[in-house]
Image: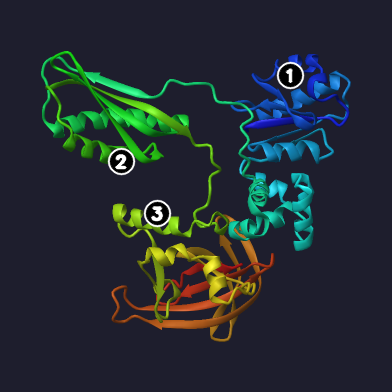
């Protein structure tokens, strides 16, 4: 958790806020801030959020504010609404569910200006979730910069930094040697790579990304030669920095042989932004998706695949996987399907979920004319009664295929709990083994 918001509708605000309460609150958390609207913020990073929230409410009650409420969440907006909009002593918002938690509240809790409030009324947007569901282009066109800020809050993208990070020494790593001196660029690259690994691991652990890194070479003549490298965008990727290092070592000329190397970070930024979904239309990031996917394919090969189906009689043998074009992958998913249908929402339907490979199950059967009908089966230690079954649907062939011949009798079965499952008997085997091939949901 990041923040705990403590609020009471009756206590004084601003300079009149009781200092004794703050003093008692600081017994439970290292930092406390009194904000606007009677909101008291506590830094919950690294602490047990539930225990801290209970303790802060208890402090308020002991000072006579029995109507105090508290909320704990990763983002400030979720903690704020949990404290001020819920009439319970405290509310803990599960990490990762901030946007889901604030969605049902009326949009007025975000405190829009009167002009923006009129626009929201005119467009029929009543809840925080309805505002968050719109895309960025629509918001910017209709509501301007203020609307975009409100839209970000509705998505639990709260830029407020209530407690500044304490200053830390920037990462660096040094190695020296005395028995020899290096002049070869390839060997220097090997040495720098080891130091860069240490620096990048520390940045990743601290949630930082570097803009500039200096290479400081200790020379045999007891002097130093420094060269600063700047990345086009902040990163903590060792691979990205080493590409820049190799390029730099090819260009620079060192005055003397090298007896030591220091890799020193000069400037960093934190990972302060909310983690976004590349495929979320709200971030308007389709071009970035295409660039990202292209880079992955260049580095690792075919990482984005699309299914291609044949007319093979066996469902589990119909699908093969082929490389997907990055431009197509960036526009794929539900939005792409909805666009292909003219923007209409897809009709709800049951979808077959295959078990791959089919899982052997124990089946009890009853005699039905020329076949055995399943009436109960056992899977993963649990027994399920079958109340209805349709079949058999017989599929056979494969005499000349690599896997050999097959013969299956499929049954679509309804369990007593309402689940629709797909069972088949392997008629190609003398024992007639049964398998669970999938279910519908």
Q: Relative to 38, does residue 26 appear above or below in the rendering?
A: above
Q: Where is mark 2, residue-wise?
A: 239
Query: Viewer-proximal residue, 251 or 302?
Result: 251
Q: Relative to 206, does residue 101 appear above or below in the rendering?
A: below
The C terminus, quarter of image: bottom right
Which of marks 1 and 2 precedes in the sequence?
1
Q: Residues within 10 Å of mark 3 (few under 14, many from 20)?
A: some
Q: Quadrant of residue 187?
A: top left
Circle 1 SS class: helix
Q: Where is mark 3, residue-wise?
A: 292
Q: Residues within 10 Å of mark 2 (few under 14, many from 20)?
A: some
Which of marks 2 and 3 precedes in the sequence?
2
Give the alpha-carbon distance from disc 1 to disc 3, as whole Å: 46 Å
Is 205 left or right of 195, judged from the image as shown?
right
> Which residue is painted at 36% across and 32% down in the image?
212
Q: Is residue 327 visible?
A: yes
Is 281 left or right of 406, judged from the image as shown?
right
The N terminus, quarter of image: top right
- As drawn, the label of residue 25 is 1
Circles 1 and 3: CB atoms closer than 8 Å: no
Q: Relative to 38, does residue 360 appear above or below in the rendering?
A: below
Q: Quadrant of residue 41?
A: top right
Circle 3 SS class: helix
- View extreme (bottom): residue: 369
Query: Looking at the picture, how far across and down is residue 434, in whole percent?
Result: 49, 69
Give the alpha-carbon distance from disc 3 to disc 2, as whole Å: 15 Å
> Which residue is painted at 65% across and 53% down in the image?
144
Query: Looking at the picture, how far across and down is residue 372, in whole percent?
Result: 55, 78
Circle 2 SS class: helix
Q: Residues within 10 Å of mark 1 (few under 14, many from 20)?
A: many
Q: Quadrant of residue 125?
A: bottom right
> Which residue is painted at 76% across and 54% down in the image?
127
């Amino acid at each position: 958790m990041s923040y705990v918001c403590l609020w009471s509708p009756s206590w004084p605000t601003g300079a009149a806020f009781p200092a004794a309460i703050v003093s008692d609150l600081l017994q439970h958390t290292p930092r406390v801030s009194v904000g606007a609207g009677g909101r008291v913020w506590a830094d919950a990073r690294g602490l047990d959020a539930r225990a801290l929230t209970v303790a802060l409410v208890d402090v308020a009650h002991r000072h006579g504010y029995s109507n105090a409420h508290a909320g704990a969440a990763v983002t400030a907006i979720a903690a704020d609404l949990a404290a001020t909009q819920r009439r319970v002593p405290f509310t803990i918002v599960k990490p990762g569910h901030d946007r889901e938690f604030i969605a049902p509240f009326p949009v007025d809790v975000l405190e829009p200006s009167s002009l923006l409030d009129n626009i929201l009324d005119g467009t029929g947007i009543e809840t925080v979730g309805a505002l968050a569901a719109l895309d960025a282009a629509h918001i910017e066109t209709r509501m301007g910069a203020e609307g975009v800020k409100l839209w970000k809050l509705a998505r639990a993208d709260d830029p407020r930094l209530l407690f500044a990070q304490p200053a830390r020494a920037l990462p660096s790593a040094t190695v020296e040697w005395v028995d020899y001196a290096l002049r070869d660029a390839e060997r220097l690259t090997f040495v720098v790579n080891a130091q860069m690994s240490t620096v990048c691991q520390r940045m990743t652990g601290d949630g930082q990304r570097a803009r500039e890194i200096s290479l400081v070479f200790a020379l045999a003549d007891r002097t130093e030669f420094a060269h600063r490298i700047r990345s086009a965008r902040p990163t903590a990727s060792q691979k990205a920095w080493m590409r820049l290092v190799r390029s730099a070592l090819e260009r620079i000329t060192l005055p003397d042989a090298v007896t030591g190397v220091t890799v020193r970070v000069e400037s960093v930024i934190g990972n302060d932004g909310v983690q976004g979904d590349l495929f979320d239309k709200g971030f308007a990031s389709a071009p970035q998706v295409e660039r990202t996917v292209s880079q992955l394919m260049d580095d690792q090969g075919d990482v984005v695949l699309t299914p291609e189906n044949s007319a093979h009689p066996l469902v589990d043998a119909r699908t093969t996987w082929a490389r997907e074009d990055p431009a197509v992958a960036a526009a794929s998913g539900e939005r792409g399907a909805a666009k292909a249908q003219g923007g209409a929402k897809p009709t709800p339907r049951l979808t077959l979920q295959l078990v791959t490979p089919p899982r052997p199950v124990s089946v009890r059967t009853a005699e039905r004319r020329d076949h055995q009908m399943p009436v109960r089966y056992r899977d993963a230690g649990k027994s399920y009664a079958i109340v209805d079954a349709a079949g058999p649907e017989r599929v056979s062939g494969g005499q000349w295929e690599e896997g050999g011949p097959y013969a299956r009798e499929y049954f679509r079965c309804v369990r007593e709990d309402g689940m629709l499952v797909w069972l088949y008997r392997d008629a190609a085997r003398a024992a007639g083994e049964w398998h669970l091939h999938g279910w519908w949901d």
